[in-house]
């Protein structure tokens, strides 16, 4: 016995709809299996001693746009260098420890060039 609504669509349309539904259900089952496999792999990575937050961060970066990722890294690195100018603060020390050795050497060289009193932030510049 056939469904009256499928008959209303017509034989070809009804068959096409049925095929779409079957393929989508199959893909959903595959997706569920893939999610389970991913969970198992992450559990294995954790058991091997890897940090899952770091692993997830790497996965997120690799899923993203490479150009945007590189631009973001460049901006973050520039911010760290800027914070490194305040080496006498806790945040400045963190920034100095976070940047690469080459960038750290550049910051130290710049600090040596521009040693002296810092202007008052409220003071007007001429």
Image: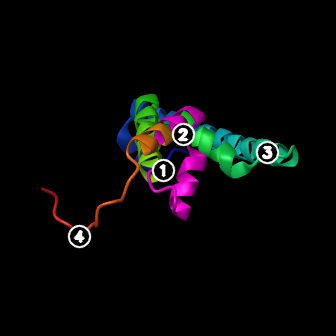
Alpha carbon separation for disc pair 2 and 4: 29 Å
The image's colouring method is: rainbow
- Viewer-proximal residue among 107 and 62: 107
| Residue 65 location (% of width, % of height) | 44, 33
**Disc 4 vs disc 1: Cβ atoms closer than 8 Å?**
no
Residue in the picture at 21% in, 67% down: 123
| Direction from residue 72 to residue 18 in the image, left or right | right
Tell me which numbered mark, 2 or 4, is placed earlier along the sequence.
Answer: 2
Alpha carbon separation for disc pair 4 and 1: 21 Å
Residue 118 forms part of the magenta stretch: no
| Residue 96 location (% of width, % of height) | 55, 48
Alpha carbon separation for disc pair 2 and 1: 8 Å
Tell me which numbered mark, 3 or 1, is placed earlier along the sequence.
Answer: 3
Alpha carbon separation for disc pair 4 and 3: 48 Å
- Residue 104 is marked as 2
Tell me which numbered mark, 4 or 3, is placed earlier along the sequence.
Answer: 3
Which span is picked out in magenta? 85-107
Name the front one of labels 4 and 3: 4
- Residue 25, can we see it? no
| Direction from residue 52 to residue 74 in the image, left or right | left
Q: Residues within 10 Å of mark 3 (few under 14, many from 20)?
A: few
Say above or below: 69 vs 114.
above
Residue located beneath label 1 in the image: 84
Residue located beneath label 4 in the image: 122
- Residue 50 is marked as 3
- Residue 72, can we see it? yes
Tell me which numbered mark, 2 or 3, is placed earlier along the sequence.
Answer: 3
């Amino acid at each position: 016995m056939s469904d009256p609504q499928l008959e209303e669509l017509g034989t070809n349309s009804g068959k096409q709809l049925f095929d779409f539904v079957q393929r989508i259900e199959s893909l959903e089952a595959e997706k569920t299996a893939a999610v389970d496999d991913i969970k198992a792999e992450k559990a294995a990575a954790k058991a091997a001693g890897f940090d899952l937050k770091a692993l997830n961060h790497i996965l997120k970066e690799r899923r993203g746009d490479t150009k945007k990722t590189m631009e973001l890294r460049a901006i973050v690195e520039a911010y760290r260098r800027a914070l490194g100018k305040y080496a006498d603060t806790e945040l400045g020390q963190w920034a100095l420890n976070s940047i690469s050795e080459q960038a750290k050497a550049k910051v130290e060289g710049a600090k040596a060039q521009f040693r002296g009193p810092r202007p008052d932030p409220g003071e007007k510049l001429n």
